[in-house]
Image: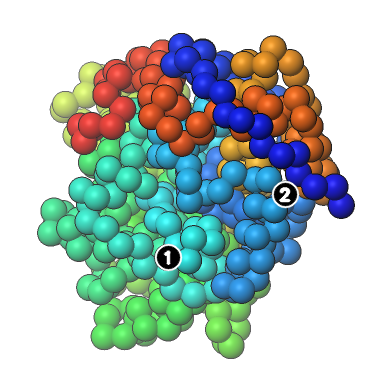
Amino acid sequence: MAKLVEAPEKRGYSKEQIGVAVSAAAEKLAGYTQARTRRTSGPIILGPNFDDCYYYKVGSNSEDGYGLETAERARQKAQALKLGLPDLSGLPREFTSLLYLSNLRGRLASGKLIVLKHFPGDAPRPDGNGSPLEDSEKRQVRIGGSLEEMERGPLRPFILAIKMRQPQAIMVSHAAYDMEKDLRRKYPELAAPCSGETPASLSPFIIRGLLRRELGFEGLVMSDWYIMGAIGQFMERARAGTALEGVSQPAALVILAIYAGVNNISCPLLSGKFGDRMVRIEQVRDEVEGYCLKNRGFRAIFESLVAETFYLKAKNMPADFRESLPFRIEDISFGDLSREGPELPAEKAAALKALNDYVGSLPFTDKLLVLTTLSGDLAELAAPEARVKSMYDFYGEGQDVWNRNGILSLKFRKDVVESLAGKKWPDPPGLPENEAGWITALMHDASFRAVYDGIDWNGAGMKKACTDALAGLMQQAGSRLGGQVWTKSR
């Protein structure tokens, strides 16, 4: 194998040159992700990632390589760095935030339903080998940091995204967060059956408190897949000493997700099995309905969440579905859902009443179907004429379009080089299997390296250029934050 081209003597570029090149690269990345997303089949895109998950994964987007153990992850990182992928540990937050927001901007322009993930973010692994969220595939994970520390760090890009332009959906991670203690003190009125540390995807304090109330998110809240190891380990102890002790683990999981405020409860019964015990889908439905009948407070939470979810999903459904409803979705805003009738204009109050009446008339199975992505079994239990079935069919699909930030980081850097050099190099290939060849070709191109190695990628000039470009994105979107990208203000 040929050796990498030797790095030349570094030559400086002016702040103005770097600023123009970074802004141009942000535009190019948005255009690239928009075009790539449009070519993808399926109405839902599970991405982009606003974290470091699978940063070092090169050459495949299959399940192979997910949930790696420490030694395997170290080998994956070493191979990626040897090829020439930028080292994650050296990337400034100014750069990664601009990368994330540019990626999101392009995807939102694709016309598909975009699911930003994994809220509320991650933190560097102590060993430097990617994101600790990757470990939730197999086991429970805890992310340290107070609420204030998270707001200045991993949570910040999510705050910017919500204020810049509401993403249609956000996927919540299965990690547990130390900041949940702060949120429990801040929102003691929120109902929560579990008193101990809870994964974000089942935490009312992180979803209803932080995401909804504090950050003002008005889109769909989706969980990550509930079949992952972090949830399996949590559920082994979650029911003990609570009112959930008398129901099966899958039913308890659905109940906890409803308490948390999850609009799309993702695959709690993908295999129909939790641990070693088989549970039929009819049993889960009956247990959740029985819990509703015994717990008036939970029933109110359930009915409210079903109406909220129906509204949010119907907004993104094809026009023929919306036109078949006995009310106009356009007459209702998300904020109207929590307002009392007398506070609303007559037209809005009538539309909101029609929504609640319609959703309230659905059989319990169909209400549960609005909230869950379980399996075809549940859809078959629903009434054949139920309109909600077409909603299930629409939301049952999902495509995870290639969104690993390692490849995108190098693509962004390539675009910066193009602006400075006045020359073009190929974009990442359409097939992940060709990514290693693409990286190798760039790193062995003498004219590319002559510019690439002359840039201080982590220096003050690059950080300022990224901050300025990000502030421009915020202002362009009409964000209340304006150019105040790194202040605590929300």
Residue where numbered disc 1 is placed: 126
Q: Position of residue 45 (x, y in %)?
A: 62, 40
Q: Looking at the picture, does residue 330 appear above or below residue 98?
A: above
Identify the image quadrant of residue 328: top left
Kind of residue sitting beneath label 2: Leu
Q: Nearer the viewer, residue 189 or 488?
A: 488
Label drawn at residue 83: 2
| Of 150 and 128, the residue lying toward us | 128
Residue 15, image x, y percentages: 44, 16
Near-viewer residue (413 or 432): 413
Neighbour tally class for label 1: few under 14, some 14-19, many 20 plus, Cα within 10 Å: few
Q: Is 459 drawn above or below residue 147 in the view shown?
A: above
In terms of secondary structure, where does tag 2 sit? helix
In the image, what residue occupies the spot 17% across and 58% down?
182
Q: Residue at x 45, y 79 (%)?
A: 233
**Element on which disc 1 rests:** loop
| Residue 364 place in picture, x, y as percent | 46, 58
Single out the mark in the foreground, 1 or 2. Answer: 2
At label 1, the amino acid type is Pro
